[in-house]
Image (spheres, rainbow, N blue to C red):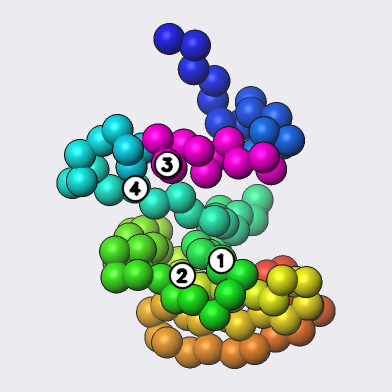
Amino acid sequence: MNEQPIQNIPQNFRQRGYLKSYNKWHWQNLPSWCYMIDLDSIEFRPNRGIVAIIETRSTDTYLNKFQYEIVTRIARLLNVPAYLVRHSLDLKMFKVKNLVTDEEKELNEGDYINFLKYL
């Protein structure tokens, strides 16, 4: 089999939907009890390790029950916060929801950059 690690897939393949096609392939070829989720972001800091799990949306949609359960379970196992970040299409406004505490705040781009820097 000619498999490549994900990190070896060129960025332009990712931008053209290569990873989305994997999701589709997974759903079409595996039984319904073989769930999968593609995490959007694992925030990592060299001196602290993993500091947060982030799932993003470009609309006002939320996670379904399964996605919420998996994202929060992973965060609890890693002892880090889990966030849902819903952002405007121009990436200027960000609604950040802590999935454990349900605290939600709306941040502009500069504030969101600071939020990420100081996780």
Disc 1 marks which amino acid?
Thr
Looking at the image, which residue is at 53% across and 89% down?
Answer: 104
* Whether label 2 touches label 3, CB < 8 Å: no
Disc 3 marks which amino acid?
Lys
Helix, strand or loop status at disc 4: loop
Q: Which of marks 4 and 3 is nearer the N terminus?
A: 3
Q: Position of residue 34 (x, y in %)?
A: 23, 43
Disc 4 to disc 3, how far (Cα)?
11 Å
- Residue stretch rendered in magenta on the structure: 15-25
Q: Which of marks 4 and 3 is in front?
A: 3
The label number, if any, that marks residue 36 in the structure image: 4
Mark count:
4
Left or right: where does residue 53 sit relative to residue 106?
A: left
Q: Which of marks 2 and 1 is nearer the N terminus?
A: 1
Say which residue label 2 marks. Answer: 82
Q: Where is residue 15 in the image (x, y as percent from the top left)?
A: 69, 43
Disc 2 marks which amino acid?
Ala
Q: Position of residue 99 (x, y in %)?
A: 42, 77
The label number, if any, that marks residue 24 in the structure image: 3
